[in-house]
């Protein structure tokens, strides 16, 4: 298990424009050849947007982009013609495939915090695809077969336990609260990368605790 603390993330974004970003992996000008990916995950960015701030239209290719809103509302528009508002508890997925362009903004009056995770597809190409699954529950895994991955959401009361999937790769991100993962204390923004996970448990030390777990097959 490789633990990465929130304070160790690369700082990015444009604070003067109301954009603050924390990168968990090598990203843009923050190049780290030893931290390019884990399993299918190639980026895990914590984004904080002030009201009115956002990312102007920009392109993506050959990437599965999954977004989880922590607080506030994210307004999304893309070249497939979709325009949606994503709220806490929703899973947004944009499959860039052969190419897509999109805009992401905080059109609300409150600060916006969201987590955006990029996964490498098993095969490049195809047609862009977009969807939002509203109010994802703990008992409903979100499958991403294009990347050989499944997202699990865990919300726990203090003292509650949850099993970590047995898998070749598991990426665990703490959204809120504090948890014990295989005896290691993790707080908000901390992450753990598990290889060949088996019989691993997470225990909530405080409530509410919220975890995102990517279960990934060997590639």
Image (cartoon, grey):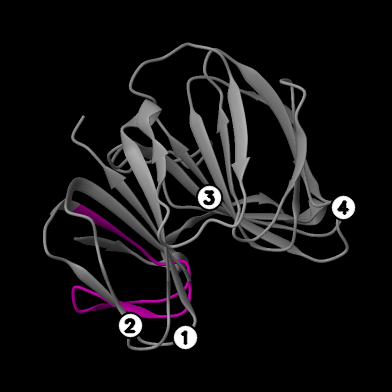
Q: Are marks 2 and 1 in contact (CB under 8 Å)?
A: yes
Identify the magenta region: 176-194
User: What is the quadrant of the N terminus in the image?
Assistant: bottom left
Name the side, left or right, on which 132 lies relative to 26. right
Task: Specify which label sits upstream in the sequence, 3 or 4.
Answer: 3
Task: Report, in whole angstroms, how far the alpha carbon at label 4 lies from the one at label 2.
Answer: 38 Å
Extreme-front residue of the structure: 139
Tell me what residue is drawn at x 23 percent, y 56 percent.
Answer: 165
Tell me what residue is drawn at x 36 percent, y 16 percent.
Answer: 123
Q: Position of residue 3 (x, y in %)?
A: 28, 64
Residue 90 marker: none
Task: Specify which label sits upstream in the sequence, 2 or 1.
Answer: 2
Callout 4: SS = loop
Task: Report, in whole angstroms, how far the alpha carbon at label 2 lies from the one at label 3.
Answer: 27 Å
Q: Is residue 109 above or below residue 150?
A: below
Q: Within the magenta stretch, is there residue 191?
A: yes
Task: Report, in whole angstroms, how far the alpha carbon at label 4 lies from the one at label 1.
Answer: 31 Å
Tell me what residue is drawn at x 56 percent, y 23 percent.
Answer: 96
User: What is the quadrant of the C terminus in the image?
Assistant: top left
Task: Report, in whole angstroms, how far the alpha carbon at label 3 lies from the one at label 1.
Answer: 24 Å
Name the side, left or right, on which 33 lies relative to 105. left
* Residue holding disc 1: 207
- Choose mark 2 or mark 3, whichever is in front: 2
* Residue holding disc 4: 52
Q: Position of residue 156 (x, y in %)?
A: 41, 77
* Residue holding disc 3: 45
Task: Specify which label sits upstream in the sequence, 2 or 3.
Answer: 3
- Res 173 seen here: yes
Q: Are marks 4 and 2 in contact (CB under 8 Å)?
A: no
Task: Specify which label sits upstream in the sequence, 4 or 2.
Answer: 4
* Residue holding disc 2: 160
Callout 3: SS = strand
């Amino acid at each position: 298990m490789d633990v990465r603390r929130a304070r160790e993330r690369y700082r990015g974004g444009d604070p003067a424009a109301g954009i603050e970003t924390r990168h968990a992996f090598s990203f843009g000008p923050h190049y780290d050849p030893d931290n390019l990916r884990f399993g299918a995950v190639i980026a895990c960015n914590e984004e904080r947007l002030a009201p009115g701030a956002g990312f102007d239209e920009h392109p993506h290719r050959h990437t599965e982009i999954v977004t989880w809103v922590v607080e506030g509302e994210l307004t999304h528009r893309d070249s497939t013609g979709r325009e949606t508002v994503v709220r806490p508890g929703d899973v947004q997925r944009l499959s860039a495939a052969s190419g897509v362009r999109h805009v992401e903004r905080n059109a609300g009056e409150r600060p916006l915090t969201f987590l955006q995770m990029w996964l490498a597809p098993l095969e490049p190409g195809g047609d862009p695809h977009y969807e939002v699954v509203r109010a994802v529950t703990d008992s409903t895994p979100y499958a991403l077969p294009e990347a050989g991955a499944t997202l699990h959401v865990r919300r726990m009361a203090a003292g509650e336990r949850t099993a970590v999937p047995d898998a070749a790769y598991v990426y665990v991100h703490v959204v809120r609260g504090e948890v014990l993962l295989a005896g290691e204390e993790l707080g908000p923004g901390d992450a753990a990368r598990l290889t060949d996970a088996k019989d691993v448990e997470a225990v909530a030390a405080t409530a509410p605790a919220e975890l995102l777990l990517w279960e990934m097959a060997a590639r």
